[in-house]
Image: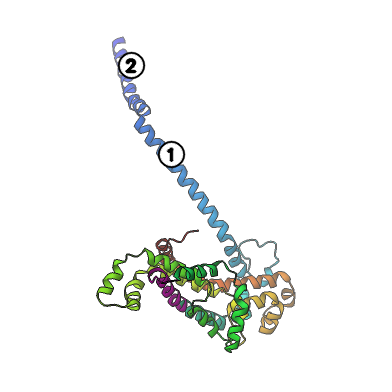
Amino acid sequence: MKAKILDKLYRLLKAVKKAINPTVENLTDPTKNIARQRKAKSIILITVRAVLLVGLSFVILFPTIQQILMALRAPEDVNNPAVVWIPENWSLMNLRIASLVLDYRSALFNTFKVSSISMGLQLASTALAGYAFSRLRFKGSNLLFVLVIITIVMPPQALSLAQYLYFRDLGLIGRETTIYLMSGLGMGIRSGIFIYIFRSFFKGLPKELEESAQIDGAGVFRTFWSVMLPNARGALITVGLFAFVWQWNDAYYVKIFEVSTEEFPLLTMRLINAAEGMYAALFYTGGLSLIGQDVWENPVFLALISNVAALLMMLPLLIMYLFVQKQFVESIERTGIVG
């Protein structure tokens, strides 16, 4: 009987030893320890990165999310302390009033028209200038390029008086043609930056492309149009998007050249005028008739309508970015723009 018990104990101890040995071997194996440490470090890095990205995204998106929720709040609930995030009474009245203040339909069409035409002219003029500075070397070209760089750091106020007097003598003050002429002649918003981008991009293209085109009998402009420009897709997308957005948000040149009028409203000037005198804007556009006196006498409500108007102005750009974000990121990588 004792022999059987001892035999069972021996087998049990042998099984336990066999089960423990692999664990001990794993703990003493340096290769597996290093792999385990690397895996733990990668998990920690991924966790920290995810926390930082989520936190930064929340900080950046928080004002926009807050403005959207406030825009969908009923006007009578503006000062309701019970409403913090989710509106108690959902309403589109704030959006409707802000649309009246901005004359949204006409101003949106005019702003899109001016920004699109200006973008096309800026692409044509700055791409041609950038190609000339990168490939067509001539006496004084470096000096001219230095002057272009100076226009990047020079504030627009330094040239605005001369530009105003020049276009006034041509009788173009108060017409959008002024913006088109500036863009087509390489004097548009941030044209110096766009010329620099195209010059850097064209310098990075191999010279064999031009040489093969010249062997086939192509001239300078033909080479630029048929060979160099199709290969500059990344720079074209980058410059096009920046030119469109900066012209869309421009208020300085639009105000100086008096482009925005009652017959030709633009979103930027309508927003500025509304922000400076929201009560008057509501009165003249008929927005006061949509709400009660106790609401439109509330200064918080007037500030809310101004913020909703800014959100409506920004909304088309956000929608457009959703469709072109992939191309935009790729073009930024190809052109090498950082910071």
Q: Is residue 132 magenta?
A: yes
Dividing the picture into quadrants, the one containing residue 229 is bottom left
Mark 1 secondary-structure assignment = helix
Mark 1 is surrounded, within 10 Å at the Cα level, by few (under 14), some (14 to 19) or many (20 or more) other residues, namely few
Q: Is residue 333 at all visible to an observer of this figure?
A: yes
Q: Quadrant of residue 90?
A: bottom right
Q: Residue at x 40, y 40 (%)?
A: 39
Cα–Cα span, label 2 and label 1: 40 Å
Q: Which residue is mark 2?
A: 9
Which residue occupies the foreground of this view, 61 or 157? 157
Tag 2: residue type? Leu
Asked whether the viewer can see residue 251, the reply is no
Residue nearest the observer in this picture, 48 or 212: 212
Q: Main secondary structure of the magenta part?
A: helix
Q: Judge by depth and name the residue closer to the eye, 333 or 211.
A: 211
Q: Percent from the top left, x then y, of residue 214?
A: 28, 74
**In the picture shown, does residue 286 fall above or below 95?**
below
- Mark 2 vs mark 1, foreground winner is 1
Where are the magenta residues, as a range?
Answer: 120-139
Look at mark 1 in the image and give the residue it sits on. 40
Name the residue at the top extreme: 2
